[in-house]
Image: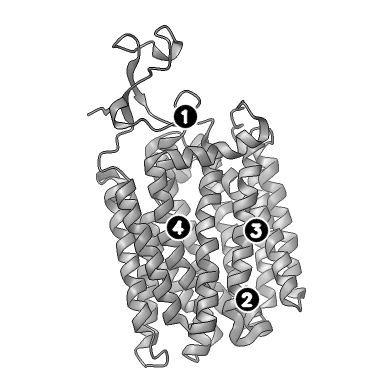
Amino acid sequence: MLSVLRHRTYRHLFTAQVIALTGTGLATVALSLLAYDIAGANASAVLGTALAIKMLAYVGIAPVISAFADRIPRRALLVSMDLVRAVVALALPLVTEVWQVYVLIFLLQAASAAFTPAFQAALPDVLPEERDYTRALSLSRLAYDLETLFSPALATALLSLASYDWLFAGTSAGFVASAALVVSVLLPKPEPVERAGGVYAKAAFGTRLFLRTPRLRALLALDLVVAAGGAMVIVNTVVLVRAGLGRSAGDVSLALGAYGAGSMAVALLLPRALDRVGDRTLMLPAAFVMTGVLAALSVGLVPATAGWSWPALLTAWTLLGATTSVILTPSGRLLRRSATSADLPAAFAARFSLSHGCWLLTYPLAGWLAAKAGPPVAAAALTVVALAAAVAAVRIWPRVDPAELEHVHPELPADHPHLTSAVEAGRRHTHEYRIDALHPQWPTPDRLRPVN
């Protein structure tokens, strides 16, 4: 898996991602402690609202930025967004009111909403080989896991030496280092895309592609499963550990680290598994395992002060992290398979926006229910959401889902250039099927036949 790091451009981008995410992980721990200092036992509600604002920024801004992605140099976009995030991170420890947290979180996440899809869309161009890209996806998953494993461990060490305000300084330093690494490489230019309808059509295309491709609609349902499990961890860990179990701030980091450890362990094993087993075979069962863990949490957290609750919590968080990795790691392969190179920025931006729309639902659900009715009730509600989404994914994603489909174009003239290889009066032909100008809808069963 590490052989892909021989590619200099990818190596620099991966290192930038690791450093930036490490800083983000420090900010996650620091933000939890800041919310606890400002709001006390209502920290879950504050975090839930702050993270909902984060999701609003992600949902609203990513598609708009994607409409201009082919006009803005990728390196300039990535570097400028890193620097914006660095400045905002330095301002966070200065806040004294809850509303100030909300404003700064929106600015920070608006920059991330521009950065992340552009970064993700660059990787398939940097690594055009499927095998290399699969391994890059696993490494990317490992990088995200550092946010919940190494970062909390580092935060624990730093908290023993200084206050959590310094964690925000570490976040800012991470973003500056990330910008420097991006500056050090040349990135492929995105392919220009012309669409009728202007900016709005460009912003909306990725969402249409996503919602009209069965495997991507199933991926969206699986993203909702992940959001249900992840919201339980991210929003309620600090309250469960500090208020429920009476443990130290360092144990908050340890619990978040268990979540990251489970995800990282699976990400290390997935590349070889994906060489032998299809994405659907791995991702769908993981969704039901995650749902089962949430269901167990809904009864297992009562009473929260029982002696077995701490190891049980660590075990549950590890399982949630592992199943998250099984679902999220292969997702880039599904997008690459479902969009042309020119449409990948729009596809990644739509995935970024739609998946975070799922978190927009689960973050406040986890926070507000935990604050008003207790963590077990929040876990029960999230179980219902996850189960419904997992069942929907099974129903939406066809068992047979080949890349190439034999299909017909009754709307095109027989001499149309797209039908050069067609048969049956020039209208039936075979190629990798993706939503685009000539294929605006997924074909109905009477207009397609899978190719064996």
In the rendered image, the quadrant that contains the C terminus is top left
Q: Earlier in the sequence, mark 1 or mark 2?
A: 2
Q: Tag 1's secondary structure?
A: loop
Determine the CA span between mark 4 and mark 2. Answer: 29 Å
Question: Dot 4 lies on which element?
Answer: helix
Q: Nearer the viewer, mark 4 or mark 2?
A: 2
**Is residue 118 positioned above or below 392 on the image?**
above
Image quadrant assignment for residue 429? top left
Q: Kindly identify the amino acid type of the residue bearing the numbered disc 3.
A: Gln
* Pointer 4 local density, CA inside 10 Å: few below 14, some 14–19, many at least 20: many
- Say if mark 1 contacts mark 2, CB within 8 Å: no
Q: Nearer the viewer, mark 4 or mark 1?
A: 1
**Mark 2, residue position:** 46
Q: Amino acid at mark 4?
A: Leu
**Tag 2 or tag 3, which sits nearer the N-term?**
2
Query: In the figure, residue 224 lies in which quadrant?
Result: bottom left
What label sits on residue 142 in the rendered view? Answer: 4
Residue marked by disc 1: 440
Q: Secondary structure at mark 3?
A: helix
Q: How far apart are the alpha carbons under marks 3 and 1?
A: 32 Å
Mark 1 burial class by Cα count in 10 Å: few <14, some 14-19, many 20+? few
Label 2 amino acid?
A: Val
The image quarter containing residue 19 is bottom right
Residue 2 appears anywhere in the view: no
Q: Is residue 343 visible?
A: yes
From the top left corner, tell me how far across and down residue 82 is, in percent.
68, 53
Residue 118 coordinates in the image, percent (x, y): 59, 43
Q: Between tags 4 and 3, which lies in front?
A: 3
